[in-house]
Image (cartoon, rainbow, N blue to C red):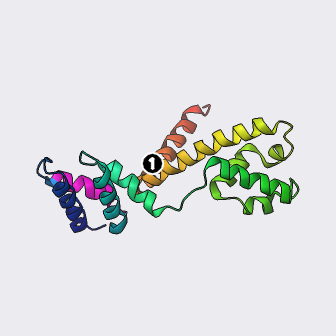
Amino acid sequence: MKKTETIKILGVIAAAYPNMKEITEIQINVWHESLKDLEAKPVQIAVQQYILEGTFPPSVAEIRKRAIAITRPELPDATTAYGEVLQAIKKFGYHRESEAMETLSPAARRTAKAMGWREMCHSEKPDVTRGQFLKMYEAVLEREQTAALLPEGMKQEIEQIRDITLQLSERLSLPE
């Protein structure tokens, strides 16, 4: 998104909320830095949606969440994802795990791998397995949604910090 588009977005917000204070250069810069990796159209739609629902001016986070939700495909809920797993178990069993995994949506696949495909197939307590899957799937979705909210540059910076921290901790734990 271009800075001029950010300024227009803030103008629309200011027009919709007449009690809002005058927009400053700092606000423009904060909003632009936070939204510049997104396309303008989903941000515009997110602002329009918010204006129709919100009685107070939105935060950057509220608009960013909405804009990303607009651009991301609809993810199956936990129950639907578990249904995918059951179908794959019936069709492929534990012997054809890789084929079964290909039929699952990405989040269901990650959850099934984390739980262990063989263990899920051979579970003697399907109600317990179902409960564990539903809970774990929700955690996977939440982690993915949180990651999706971060701009790509910030994700890279976080990864670099983690790498440096890991390297330092490995150096400190090595015997001399």
Residue at left offset 64%, top offset 47%: 78
Asked if the stretch drawn in magenta spans residue 28, the answer is yes
Res 39 visible: no
Q: Quadrant of the N terminus?
A: bottom left
Query: In this picture, which residue range is highlighted in magenta?
Result: 26-37
User: Where residue 124 appears, x then y in whole percent?
Assistant: 86, 37
**Position of residue 30 in the picture relative to residue 154 (left or right):** left
User: Where residue 171 appears, x then y in whole percent?
Assistant: 55, 37
Residue on which disc 1 sits: 158
**Vertical arrangement, residue 139 with respect to residue 12, above or below:** above
Which residue occupies the extreme front position in the image? 52
Q: Quadrant of the C terminus?
A: top right
Identify which amino acid the numbered label 1 is placed on. Answer: Ile
Residue at left offset 78%, top offset 56%: 87
- The quarter holding residue 126 reads top right
**Position of residue 139 in the picture relative to residue 153 (left or right):** right
Residue at left offset 73%, top offset 62%: 103
Residue at left offset 50%, top offset 50%: 145
Secondary structure, mark 1, is: helix
Query: Magenta region's main secondary structure?
Result: helix
User: Where residue 72 appears, x then y in whole percent?
Assistant: 49, 61
User: Where residue 129 appears, x then y in whole percent?
Assistant: 76, 39
Task: Judge by depth and name the residue closer to the eye, 117 or 58.
Answer: 58
